[in-house]
């Protein structure tokens, strides 16, 4: 079929038009030969995440710093100053000299893991699945869809890890005189393991939520998921202290955050009683596997119709 | 239309498709299950599109065009039949297919968190190009698609036409074997549309295989080598434009006005009623109108006829049948959402 599109039709001079045609034609003739491999594609996707993260660095940083800053300010500075400091967890063997900041540090980190995991994975995902379905851009990359899902978990986990790590400097600097947390890391390997698996667990949970939550009900995510998990995630008290409310102590075992905060207590403030290590690690690793599996599966189902 | 017989399609170990086909489907189907009843979006289509062809899928809204493209681009799972793109099975080897296709979706799937240049360079890197080569390729695409002054703009700041150009540029980064375009000009102003046609024409001239869906008749008419008219999940007719027009019984109407009255019996004496393709002849006053499905050489013959009979022609016109007539004849005229 003859296509009779004259240069006049597109409003350009014929010389320009020939040039444009030549440069379009060159796109086919002078194309570099792509040789995609799974690691190269994965690395490129991670590079894309960091580019976006870097561009949003100011807002990401504020989001990551403000919450621990306010928590530390109120609980480790304001409350001790006005004399309504919390009493120490009664079950604690080390009793008397443990201040609230010490109890709060692992709790704050756990809560940051969750926040960052959700903001870093769930929210972007909900955006990508809604309206224009920009997820299709990445879905057409030459890798299996599950690799894309695993890449999302990886990127979210790195953000969660950084977000939680920011808590350290904040709580060290922000407290009333003498009210600083007593942190003692005797086992760095344990700390690293707990932080890595806490990060992967929140990112996996984030991926799963991002694929099952209806974008129109995004507020529910905060009310029904984020708030209860945080409030009942042993942020403000160690799990062992709940023995006086036995039913609550048992019910909170379904809360993944309990294992993050307890794991961090085991690694950072071993002087405060904490849950058995095997239970903590089992829940963190097992939770990553379960939510990772569910997340990857529902992600795949959402992407491929 | 593929000549493969229907009874080979269920023999699980069916051999690889003919290597010269860029796209081939056998009884391809998609049924969406839902609690309110199943929706048969695509109801068994057979296509065979050779390399280098510009193929058009034409149909009204809801005909199943986008679902078909979705299946061919691995983002929609077929519920029946099979399909191969660039020689690879879309269900069993989706990664191999994705390596070889470029896709321009109907919706704007640009990465809104990235700039124009980054949209292109990261896509190149997804396809394994080193960062430096990817940046060079991005520059090349930006220049060719006239996006030079928007290079560092965020993707969400582009106009509709610019976004569409960037989407096409992005689909070309890795030199795909097959380029899919799902209603690429929907919602664009006429000038931008023609501009895009121009780009697609050049790509086609370079041997790019293109599958385009559209519900604009003139788009299919202007661009495509072959067209399949789809409706209700089925291909109603397929072939070159001329073939479609003939099949749909679309006719060319040739009108000749003479200086004088048309002599009685002129058409009969000239043997027009027996001429292949001629379906109707009307002589009225000074006008002779001939309806034909095969207008090749007809006007010339009428001119000679006039001369032989000492008649003078005042003017003559030929109304070509349009794809629109054929399309409406095939799909019916009811209104679509």
Image (tube, rainbow, N blue to C red):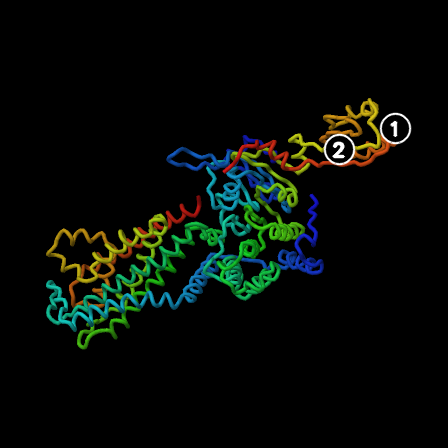
Residue, x 59% and y 32% (percent of image)?
B330
Sequence-earlier tag: 2 or 1: 2
Q: With A107 as the anchor, is A56 left or right in this view? A: right
Q: Chain of mark 2?
A: B
Image quarter of residue B34: top left
Q: Are marks 2 and 1 on the same chain?
A: yes
Q: Are marks 2 and 1 in contact (CB under 8 Å)?
A: no
> Is the residue marked by circle 2 packed among few (<14), some (14-19), or many (20+) residues within 10 Å?
many
How many numbered marks have been drawn onto this rendered protein structure? 2
Query: Residue A99 or A33: which is nearer the viewer?
Result: A99
What residue did someone put label 2 on? B254
Please state, as top left, top right, bottom left or bottom right, where the N terminus of chain B lies in the image.
top right
Above/below status of A169 relative to B85 = below
Between the C-alphas of marks 2 and 1, the distance is 19 Å
Residue, x 10% and y 63% (percent of image)?
A90
Image quarter of residue A168: bottom left
Q: Position of residue A131 (x, y in %)?
A: 43, 49
Q: With A281 as the anchor, is B60 left or right in this view? A: right
Q: With B52 as the anchor, is A272 left or right in this view? A: left
Whether residue A304 can be seen here: yes
Residue, x 39% and y 67% (percent of image)?
A57
Q: Position of residue A22 (x, y in %)?
A: 67, 58
Q: Which mark is residue B309?
A: 1
**Secondary structure under the numbered disc 1 in the rendered image:** loop
Whether residue B181 can be seen here: no
Q: Chain of mark 1?
A: B
Q: Position of residue A101 (x, y in %)?
A: 19, 69
């Amino acid at each position: 079929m003859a296509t009779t599109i004259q240069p006049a039709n597109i409003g350009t001079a014929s010389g320009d038009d020939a040039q444009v045609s030549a440069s379009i034609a060159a796109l086919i003739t002078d194309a570099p030969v792509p040789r995609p491999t799974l690691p190269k594609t994965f690395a490129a996707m991670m590079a894309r995440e960091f580019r976006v993260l870097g561009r949003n660095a100011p807002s990401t940083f504020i989001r990551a710093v403000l919450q621990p800053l306010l928590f530390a300010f109120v609980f480790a500075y304001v409350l001790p100053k006005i004399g309504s400091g919390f009493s120490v967890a009664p079950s604690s063997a080390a009793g008397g000299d443990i201040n609230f900041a010490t109890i709060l540090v692992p709790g704050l980190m756990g809560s940051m893991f969750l926040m960052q995991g959700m903001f870093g994975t769930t929210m972007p995902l909900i955006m990508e699945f809604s309206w224009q379905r920009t997820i299709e851009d990445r879905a057409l990359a030459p890798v299996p869809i599950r690799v894309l899902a695993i890449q999302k978990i990886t990127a979210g986990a790195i953000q969660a890890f950084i977000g939680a790590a920011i808590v350290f400097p904040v709580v060290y600097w922000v407290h009333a005189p003498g009210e600083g947390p007593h942190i003692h890391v005797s086992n760095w390997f344990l700390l690293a393991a707990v932080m890595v698996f806490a990060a992967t667990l929140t990112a996996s949970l984030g991926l799963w939520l991002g694929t099952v939550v209806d974008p129109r009900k995004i507020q529910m995510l905060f009310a029904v998921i984020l708030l209860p998990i945080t409030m009942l995630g042993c942020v403000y008290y160690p799990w062992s202290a709940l023995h006086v409310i036995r039913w609550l102590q048992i019910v909170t075992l379904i809360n993944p955050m309990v294992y993050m905060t307890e794991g961090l207590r085991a690694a950072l403030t071993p002087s405060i009683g904490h849950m058995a290590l095997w239970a903590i690690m089992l829940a963190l690793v097992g939770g990553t596997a379960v939510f990772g599996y569910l997340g990857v599966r529902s992600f795949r189902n959402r992407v491929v119709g | 239309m593929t000549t493969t017989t229907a009874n080979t399609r269920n023999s699980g170990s069916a051999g690889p498709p003919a290597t010269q086909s860029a796209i081939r489907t056998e009884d391809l189907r998609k049924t969406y299950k839902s609690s309110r009843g199943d929706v048969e979006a695509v109801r068994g289509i057979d296509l065979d599109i050779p390399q280098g062809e510009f193929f058009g899928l034409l149909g009204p809204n809801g005909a199943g065009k986008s679902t078909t493209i979705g299946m061919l681009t691995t983002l929609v799972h077929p519920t029946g039949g099979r399909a191969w793109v660039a020689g690879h099975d879309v269900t069993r080897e989706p990664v191999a297919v994705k390596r070889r296709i470029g896709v321009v979706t109907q919706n704007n799937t640009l990465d809104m968190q990235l700039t124009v240049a980054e949209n292109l360079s990261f896509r190149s890197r997804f396809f394994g190009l080193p960062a430096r080569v990817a940046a060079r390729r991005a520059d090349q695409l930006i220049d060719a698609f006239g996006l030079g002054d928007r290079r560092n703009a965020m993707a969400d700041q582009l106009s509709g036409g610019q976004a569409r150009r960037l989407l096409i540029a992005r689909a070309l980064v890795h030199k795909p074997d097959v380029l899919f375009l799902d209603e690429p000009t929907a919602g664009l102003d006429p000038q931008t549309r023609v501009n895009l046609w121009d780009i697609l024409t050049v790509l086609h001239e370079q041997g790019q295989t293109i599958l385009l869906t559209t519900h604009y008749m003139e788009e299919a008419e202007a661009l495509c080598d072959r067209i399949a008219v789809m409706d209700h999940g089925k291909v109603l007719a397929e072939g070159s434009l001329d073939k479609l027009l003939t099949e749909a019984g679309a006719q060319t109407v040739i009108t000749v006005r003479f200086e004088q009255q048309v002599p009685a019996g002129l058409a009969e004496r000239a043997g027009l009623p027996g001429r292949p393709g001629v379906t109707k002849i009307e002589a009225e006053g000074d006008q002779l109108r001939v309806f034909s499905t095969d207008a090749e050489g007809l006007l010339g013959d009428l001119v000679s006829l006039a001369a032989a009979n000492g008649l003078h022609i005042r003017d003559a016109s030929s109304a070509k049948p349009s794809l629109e007539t054929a399309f409406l004849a095939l799909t019916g005229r009811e209104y679509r959402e």
